[in-house]
Amino acid sequence: MELKFSANAGFFGMRRDRFTQYQPQRDLEEKIELVASVEGVTGVELKYPNDFADLKRVCELLEKRDLQVSAVNVDIKDAEHFRHGALSARSQTAREKVIGLLCEGMDLAAELGTGLVTTCPLADGYDYPFQIDHGEAWGQFIDSVARVVAHRRDVTLLLEYQPHEPHARIMLGDVGKMLHVCAEVGAENLGANLDVGHSFAAGESPAEAAALLAAKGRLRYIHTNDNTGDGGDWDMMSGTVHFWDWLELLHTLERIGYSGWFGGDIAPKQMGPVEAYRTNFRLVRRMNGLLERLGRERLAELVGRDGNTAETFDFLSSFME
Amino acid sequence: MNKLAIISGFLGKTLNRYMTYQEDRGLATRIEMASRVEGADGLEVCYPADFGDFAELKELLEKFELGVSAVNFRSRRTGKWWRGSFISEIAEERGEVVDDLKRAMDFAAELGCNRITTCPLNEGTDTLFEADYGRIFDYAVESFGEACAHNRDVRVCIEYKINDPMARCLFGSAGETVSFCLLVGADNLGATLDIGHSLLARERPAQAAVLLDRAKRLFYVHLNDNDGVWDWDMLPGAYHFWETIEFIYVLRQLGYDDDWFAFDVFPKELDTVENYGAVMQLTRKLEEITDRIDVGKMEALMRERNSSQTIPYLYSLI
């Protein structure tokens, strides 16, 4: 399996959480320079609208560092327009605004030669019971997504599901809801950006989520990371917690013939972004290499038999001897 | 009856990973806002943020007739103390935070609340093998021990929390906190029981309160609520109605009934004064529902431990 690595430029500048601010503020040029210096990275995910104030300049910077845009990440969570939802908003003004932003993102993606726009619909959620009318909100959500993908068929819209934050519950919170949206909308140019940490936070097995998405032709992009599985989206380096789940995911991706990007959503905190991303991608590459060395066919054969878990793990752990 | 306090930091700008809510507000504005919250009796003031001009702080509290429940000591500072302050591997950093905590204790004494609450959130780890747990516990014992010895009349309360911003904090539960306090052995070191943090740690808050009380370490209480997944700092009782009732009932049994309830509730984009007005109203309502429990009857029911009797009795009260 070819591993194409892309880094999310946003993580290379100042980040914050509720309590703390990490890393200095860096401008786009500095961020792109840092991304380009990460071993093995050939792609970069940039945010629309923030990173694209000067498109010509962006193109020059990318060309200079020989980076491709892996996907245009459209930010649809700002409080000014989307306080009460974006895709699912009752307000037509908010819906027109978000549809407009995503369509602009698609045009930009076409111009940049990437066929992908990704967005994490974090404004579409709720904190309290009785806060929203779920039927109405889901109707609007699906209708808005259908309108966006109808804008142009040569660019794919990727939705990145996440169970919560900043709302206690995000509507598009798990792989089941993701597949529901795809089934309802139906368009070919709609797919999932499977963020591995979000899948863990949703209590899923990312390997199972990947298999489900792939079965419907909807697995188009992956964000690599990890977390402690307690619901917190810690954006940790891949495999630092869920080592075996990560191996299973990489095994599954190879079986289903995944050929898309391996993006990175890693919070560098005080480590520094270049080091954190380099190690993250090395971890992914090394875990994948481990499967190669162990023998993927033999592994598939073992997994293909019932009641065979002990033998499978005996095989998997043989590298420790 | 417990008095009700708002944590001053929640009256201005608040952040999470993605959003900024409300505007940055100065001390005078925040205190004036608190005075407009119906039912609020005082503030939990934040150190160092609110202490730029101590005379002004005292003047404002007096002017708006607001009490002080505690001084909230912030042990996280952007740009420093990255690997924890009380548990830092760097001795100067540990010295620095202990000195600063002593200063905050002096202010708490001068304000008359004689109580520090601190949530040591950078005291923890993200990944496995990140720190030597033995050493960081030893550092913590030494740091808190030294601070507590500074003034035995000021109670220092560790507000335990399982995570955020570290994937695992050092003080994650009532059990971890109480055993740490016993390890330090200072009578003025105890716990702040934040009901939301307790729920996040998969505790029964009432049970946690009793454990802390038995060890003489139930020093202070924060009220709020969440969905059990994350520390959303929501309106009291919005999710855990009966847990909150049981908690208030047990606090009364323990004699925590003439103290303060402080609130960390995130108003997010809602009107802050209105949101905190709802906090106060809901708290008094939850207390009023708790009043309806006949203590003699409840004690008899508890001796039976028969939920078929107890739960219908509780529902008969609402």
Image (cartoon, rainbow, N blue to C red):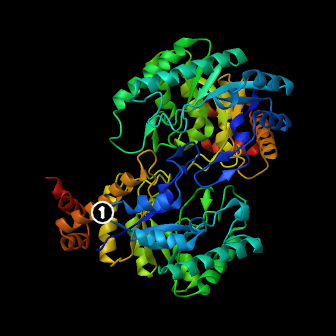
At a point 62% along the width and 85% down the height, the residue shown is: A151
In this picture, residue A112 sits left or right of residue A41: right
Residue B87, image x, y percentages: 43, 29
Relative to B16, say whether A246 is above or below.
Answer: below
Question: Residue B98 location, x and y as percent?
Answer: 51, 21
Classify 10 Å Cα crowding around label 1: few (below 14), some (14-19), many (20 and above): some
Q: Depth check: A259 or A40 in front?
A: A40
- The residue labelled by disc 1 is A247
Secondary structure at badge 1 equals helix
Residue found at x 41% / y 69%: A64
Q: Chain of mark 1?
A: A
Check the picture and name the quadrant holding the N terminus of chain B: top right
Residue A171 in the image: above or below residue B150: below
Residue A308 seen by the camera: no
Res B216 → quadrant: top right
x, y percentage for residue A213?
A: 44, 76
Q: Is residue A288 left or right of residue B165?
A: left
Quadrant including the C terminus of chain B = top right
- B193 left or right of A219 in image: right
Q: Which residue is rendered at x = 55% and y = 85% of the image?
A: A186
The amino acid marked with disc number 1 is Leu
Most distant residue in the left direction:
A321
Name which residue lies at 58% across and 87% down: A152
Q: How many marks?
A: 1
Which quadrant would residue A44 be assigned to in this image? bottom left
Could you tell me residue B206's position as x and y percent? Answer: 60, 34
Of B215 and A85, nearer the camera is: A85
The correct choice, above or below, for B316 with respect to B150 in the image is below
Residue A155: in sight, yes or no? yes
